[in-house]
Image: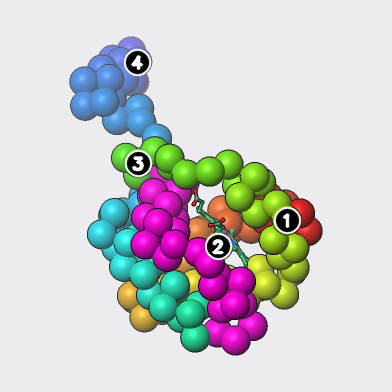
Amino acid sequence: MIFKTRLIAVMLLMGLSGSVQADDSLYQELGGKEGISNVMAEMLYELAGDDRIADQFADTDIDRLHQMLTEQVCEISGGPCTYTGEDMVKIHTGLNITNADFNALVENLIIAMEREEIPTTAQNRLLSLLADMHHEVVGL
Ligand code: HEM
């Protein structure tokens, strides 16, 4: 009986505090919108000096890319953002992106996250979410 009462109390509290929400722990660990923006800026800086893939971004509006990546990572990490960019398959189709290109970008991202002192567990969670997008980027 006591257990049942407590269960109801917990359920009420969860309802009142609105805690039945999406998990935003990864978003928080990445430092929120500002932290994600910083990581993406570092990654693009790193990428610009990476001979393996820099040329592929020669005609890209980097400010827009920065903004779109920040929105996207904010959204997929559980943050309060909505990605407003192009469909992932559509934007990457015809770019002939290879596995090696994908891995190079991931390396740049890891360097950026290390520099921004993102905890390793959070790094791995983000990398796993991006790995899920591999088929929307590579071989199109
Ligand atoms: C999981 C990995 C990746 C994610 C999440 C991602 C995400 C994005 C996003 C959000 C955009 C901007 C879309 C827009 O402007 O509306 C974009 C554009 C672009 N991406 Fe990726 N991308 C990934 C991997 C790659 C790789 C590996 C390359 C090549 C090395 C690449 C090359 C490009 C280029 C060149 C553009 C600009 C295309 C244009 O402006 O027409 N992406 N990507």
Q: Residue at x 55, y 84 (%)?
A: 50
Structural distance between the alpha carbons of marks 1 and 4: 59 Å
Q: Which label belongs to residue 4?
A: 4
The x and y percentages for residue 58 are 54, 72
Instruction: Identify the secondary structure beneath mark 1.
Output: loop
| Scheme by which the image is coloured | rainbow
Question: Which image quarter holds the N terminus?
Answer: top left
The amino acid type found where label 4 is placed reads: Lys
Q: Which label belongs to residue 127?
A: 2
Structural distance between the alpha carbons of marks 4 and 3: 38 Å
Q: Residue at x 30, y 15 (%)?
A: 8
Where residue 15 sits, quadrant-wise, is top left
Camera-near label (2 vs 1) is: 1
Q: Is 57 in the magenta?
A: yes
- The tag earlier along the polypeptide, 2 or 1, is 1
Q: Quadrant location of ligand 1?
A: bottom right
Judging by the rendered image, the residue that carries numbered circle 3 is 81
